[in-house]
Image (cartoon, coloured by chain):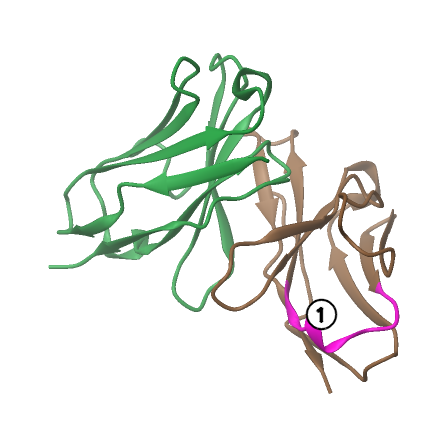
Amino acid sequence: SYVLTQPPSVSVAPGKTATITCGGNNIGTKSVHWSQQKPGQAPVLVIYYDNDRPSGIPDRFSGSNSGNTATLTISRVEGGDEADYYCQVWDANSEHPGVVYGGGTKLTVL
Amino acid sequence: EVQLVESGGGLVQPGGSLTLSCATSGFTFSLYYMTWVRQAPGKGLEWVASIKDDGSEKYYGDSVRGRFTISRDSAKNSLYLEMNSLRVDDTAVYYCARDTIGDHWGQGTVVTISS
């Protein structure tokens, strides 16, 4: 089955840029979506189809996807960005198609 | 405004059954795939199941296939998850989400499997 690999944690100072990666075999051929989850809350979609932002998501959030790595970039990081971030794809190629989530990355704002 | 409201969670003994519901509003339910995702305590998101907009196709995660059944009722704008042969490791917050990308989520319902 398809596997998505994320770093468990990323730390960044306020005002700097955070980069969270999501690795998968030829992930560049798939559409990647990113969700943000703060403690005790439901996830919120922040990037879909590699680099589209839902309404209400600041343009500080952006995404890219190529080769074996998709990336979520958060510019001018704020304290309110501290959360867990999950990448996900639809794996259509397996015997049993379905959604695959990465293990999640905890973003800490120093 | 899109709203998803889960219900039906609770405490069940191992081997038991439970059915979760997700009432939706604010969008044309019959046009969207729907998805269940769960999160065990202190763990990451785990996809459980998805169902096509017309209900004709259903997809399940490996850990629940054969035990859980996803369904929908367009007349009631509702999504369901029937869970059988429940195990301790099914303990989690269960979320319903719109589409397979999860562009909207409910607040979740807690399922605890314990003797």
Q: Tell me if residue A26 can be seen.
A: no
**Pointer 1: what residue?**
A81
Q: Which is more toward the observer, A43 or A4?
A: A43
Kindly indicate the quadrant of the structure image that contains residue A5.
Answer: bottom right
Mark 1, chain letter?
A: A
Please provide the residue range marked out in magenta: A74-84
Which x, y percent locates residue A91?
64, 35
State whether residue B10 appears in this view. Answer: yes
User: Is the residue marked by circle 1 packed among few (<14), some (14-19), or many (20+) residues within 10 Å?
Assistant: some
Percent position of residue A105, x then y: 65, 67
Q: Nearer the viewer, residue B71 or A53?
A: A53
Q: Residue at x 82, y 56 (%)?
A: A58
**Position of the N terminus of chain B by quadrant:** top right
Tell me, what hue is chain A? brown
Chain B color in figure: green
Question: Which residue of the protein is positioned furthest toward the bottom in this rendering?
Answer: A110
Please give the name of the residue rendered at 74% of the width and 57% of the height, measured from the top-left corner: A22
Residue closest to the far front:
B1
Give the structural element (helix, strand or loop) at label 1.
helix
Quick check: A50 left or right of B90?
right
Asked where in the image residue A90 lies, by quadrant, the reply is top right
Task: Give percent across and percent down for residue A36.
Answer: 65, 58
Query: Is A83 in front, or is A7?
Result: A83
Using residue B70 as the reference point, say whether residue B31 is left or right of it: right
Instruction: Identify the residue at image location x=59%, y=44%.
Output: A100
Q: Is residue A21 above or below residue B63?
A: below
Whether the magenta-drawn stretch holds residue A75 is answered as yes
Name the side, left or right, on which A89 lies relative to B60: right
